[in-house]
Amino acid sequence: MNSVWLLIGLAVALIIMITFARRGLWASSKGYPLLLASFPLYYWLFALWAMDFQALLYEAATAVVFFLLAGWAIKSRNPARWWLAGIGMLLHAGYDFFHDTLFSNAGTPIWWPQFCGMVDLVLALYLCALATSSGSLRLPGQRLTYKE
C-alpha cells in the first residue's frame, strides 16, 4: 500500500464532502448516488485507453451492481438513500482494494485502486453516519433543508 495515495484519497473525499455540504447536495436525492454511479466509469475509461475489451466487459458487468444501488438510492427517502449510497460506496471501496486480484485491467494506473478505494471508504463511512444520525450530522456550512 502506498500511503501517499491513501492520504490524497482522504483529502479528495473531504473536499467532496465539504463541497456537497456547502452546495446543499448532501440532502439531494441525487448527489451521492450519482457520484456512486460515476465511479465504475473510470475503470471503463482505463480499459478503453488500453484497448482491453475483455476488461471492459468485466468492468461493465460489475458496474451493474453500483448502477442499481445508485438508482435505488435516488428513489429512496432519507435516511435509506444514505444507507444505500453508503453501502454502495463501501462495496466499491472493496472492489477497488481487491481490483487487481479480481481481474486485470491493463489501463488502470497502479495508484488508482488505493486512491479511489480511500475516497470510497471515507464517503461510505460518512454516508452511513448520516443515515444513523438521521441527518443531524452536519459539516460546516451545510444546509439543513432536504431536497426530494
Image (cartoon, grey):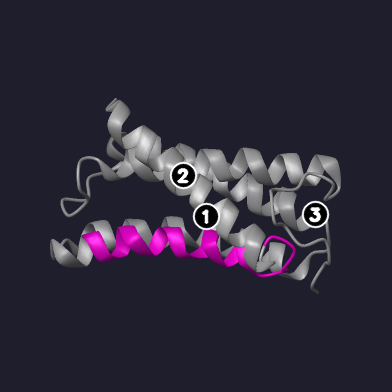
- In this view, the residue in front, 7 or 72, is 7
Amino acid under disc 3? Ala
Res 16 label: 1
Percent position of residue 11, x then y: 44, 42
Quadrant of the rendered structure where residue 31 is?
Answer: bottom right
State whether residue 98 appears in this view.
Answer: no
Q: Of helix, strand and loop, which one carries label 3?
A: helix
* Frontmost residue, 59 versus 33: 33
The magenta span reads: 26-46
| Mark pair 2, 3: CA separation | 21 Å
Residue for point 61% across, 61% down = 20
Q: CA distance from mark 2 to mark 1?
A: 9 Å
Query: Residue sitting at 56 percent across and 60 percent down?
Result: 19
Task: Name the mark nearer the viewer: 2 or 1.
Answer: 1
Q: Main secondary structure of the magenta part?
A: helix
From mark 3 to mark 1, how far is it between C-alphas?
21 Å
Specify whether 137 is left or right of 19.
right
Label 1 environment density (alpha carbons within 10 Å; few <14, some 14–19, many ≥20)? some
Q: Are marks 2 and 1 in contact (CB under 8 Å)?
A: yes
Secondary structure at numbered mark 2: helix
Q: Residue at x 38, y 65 (%)?
A: 41
Amino acid at circle 2 = Val
Sequence-first tag of 2 and 1: 1
Q: Magenta includes 91?
A: no
Label 3: how many Cα within 10 Å (few below 14, some 14–19, many 20+): some
Measuring from the top left, give residue 115's x and y in whole percent.
Answer: 35, 41
Q: Is residue 148 left or right of residue 116?
A: right
Which residue in the protein does label 3 denote? 80
Residue receiving disc 2: 119
